[in-house]
Image (cartoon, grey):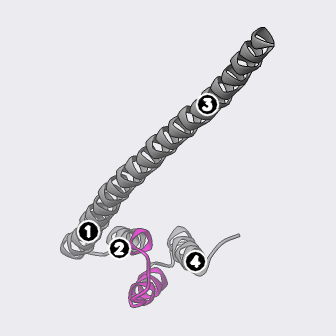
Amino acid sequence: MTDVYTDQLKAVMDLFDNNEIEKCIVKAKKNLSDKTLPPYYVIENCLLIACASDTCEEADDWKTRAEQAYTAFAEVTRKVYEDSLMTLNDLRKELDDLDKQKKEELLCEQIREAQIISEEDQEMIDREEREGEEEMAA
């Protein structure tokens, strides 16, 4: 499944490949007028215009725009990546803390159960001793 941006870029590339340079440039510039155009497509359209340009100056201008879009995209991606890593680290800490808390609760529960069993065992021992003493006294 392709999206609109991919279809638009492919149309510009086809124009370039078919040596319809003026139409290629017009279509690429039209694509670039879309403020929602994702960075990858901005870069690709700028590069196509740079390749299709008649003059070195115009090609350099469009290459510079592609470079600027690339730099901005790379910075945002790096920032998102760093933020994602920080978020993941925070989540890992929360998971580890929860795991530690649950292990402590389980240990406390096991100790309580052991104490209850011990108290029950002690009551049984005391009862047996009393019964033994009663039998000896009789």
Percent x, y of residue 31: 45, 85
**What is the CA distance from the residue labelled 2 to the residue labelled 4?**
14 Å
The crowding category of the residue bearing disc 4, from other C-alpha atoms within 10 Å (few below 14, some 14 to 19, many at least 20), is some
Task: Confirm whether the magenta stretch covers residue 86.
Answer: no
Residue drawn 41% across the image and 82% down it:
25
Say which mark, if any, is on residue 72: 1
Q: What's the magenta bit mostly, secondary-structure-wise?
A: helix
Q: Please state which of the two labelled residues, at mark 2 or mark 1, is closer to the viewer.
A: 1
Of label 4 and label 1, which has the lower sequence position? 4
**What is the CA distance from the residue labelled 4 to the residue labelled 1?**
25 Å
**What is the CA distance from the residue labelled 2 to the residue labelled 3?**
81 Å
Which of these two is toward me, 81 or 104? 104
Residues at discs 3 and 1 in contact (Cβ within 8 Å):
no
Of label 2 and label 1, which has the lower sequence position? 2
Circle 4 SS class: helix
**What is the CA distance from the residue labelled 3 to the residue labelled 1?**
70 Å
Residue position for label 3 = 119
Whether 33 is drawn above or below 17: the answer is below
Residues at discs 4 and 3 in contact (Cβ within 8 Å):
no
Of label 2 and label 3, which has the lower sequence position? 2
Task: Confirm whether the magenta stretch covers residue 26.
Answer: yes
Which of these two is toward me, 129 or 17? 129
Q: Quadrant of residue 69?
A: bottom left
Residue drawn 72% across the image and 14% down it:
133
Residue position for label 2 = 46
Whether 107 is drawn above or below 105: the answer is above
Please state which amino acid type lies under the numbered disc 4. Answer: Ala
Residues at discs 2 and 3 in contact (Cβ within 8 Å):
no
The crowding category of the residue bearing disc 2, from other C-alpha atoms within 10 Å (few below 14, some 14 to 19, many at least 20), is many
Circle 1 SS class: helix
